[in-house]
Amino acid sequence: MSAALALFKRELRIASRAGGGGAMGVVFFLILITIVPFAIGPDLNLLSRIGPAILWIAALLAMLLGLDRLFLGDHEDGSLDLLQMGALPLEVVIVVKCLAHWAVTGLPLVIVAPLFGLMLAVEGDGLAGVAASLLAGTPALTLIGAIGAALTVSLRRGGLLLAILVLPFTVPVLIFGVSAASAASGGTVPFATPFLILCALSLAALALAPFAAAAALRSRD
């Protein structure tokens, strides 16, 4: 536990030193939400209906911004090899790095989503549903993204390839995340059904993604 905690603190220090990781995601999140009303018009009823979907799509794209740096810095300076040979299993290292990445990039999106949802005329219950669904679903996005980051870590300019690899596998998370957020706004489906499926997807990603990412890192050149 002490080694995992030390690694977690290290990742947070690296993120703060690099600067702009969480803030850049929040700003990108805000930009996407701001331009949607210009594209579809000022119809508040329409914005309210599609608001949860817009928030989820914006959060997904915002989280993709920093995923290519999840292992890249450690690979370039050689510390990834040291972590691989260290006391912690590589799978645990990946979980800790994903947790730190989510705390820096995913958690701020969960916090600001209700505030930005007001810009889309989403009402109180819908705002709470969006925040709850993002809290349950964004860890799955980070863990799935870790697989893509591990596969492309040794490639130059692998960010675009990472997005192409990762986006198809995030579709189930997006579907049930939007369903849960929409159900909280008064949809026909009970909120608990898609929300529990969303939690199950995050738990499944937690169980499987570290092993897949570790295998990809071990097989890199």
Image (cartoon, grey):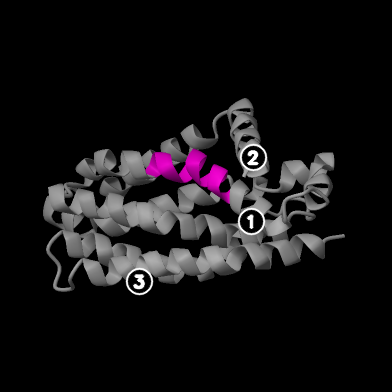
Q: Name the residue located 21 percent from the left edge and 66 percent from the top edge.
A: 191
Mark 2 is on which residue type?
A: Ser
Question: In the image, which disc is placed on residue 2?
Answer: 2
Question: Where does the image place residue 41, in percent across and percent down from the top left?
Answer: 21, 50
Magenta segment range?
98-109
Res. 167 visible in picture: no
Q: Which residue is mark 1?
A: 160
Circle 1 SS class: helix
Give whichever of 150, 200 is nearer the camera.
200
Give whichever of 192, 128 is nearer the camera.
192
Instruction: Give me the C-alpha separation between circle 1 and circle 3.
Output: 29 Å
**Left or right: 41 with respect to 29?**
left
Q: Name the residue located 67 percent from the left edge and 68 percent from the top edge.
A: 212
Q: Which residue is mark 3?
A: 197
Disc 2 to disc 3: CB gap under 8 Å: no
Q: Residues within 10 Å of mark 1 (few under 14, many from 20)?
A: few
Question: Where does the image place residue 55, in percent across and percent down from the top left?
Answer: 32, 52
Residue 193, placed above or below residue 42: below
In front: mark 1 or mark 2?
2
**Per the image, is 100 magenta?**
yes
Within the image, what quadrant is residue 175 found in? bottom left
Res. 26 visible in picture: yes
Mark 1 is on which residue type?
A: Leu
Instruction: Give me the C-alpha separation between circle 2 and circle 3.
Output: 33 Å
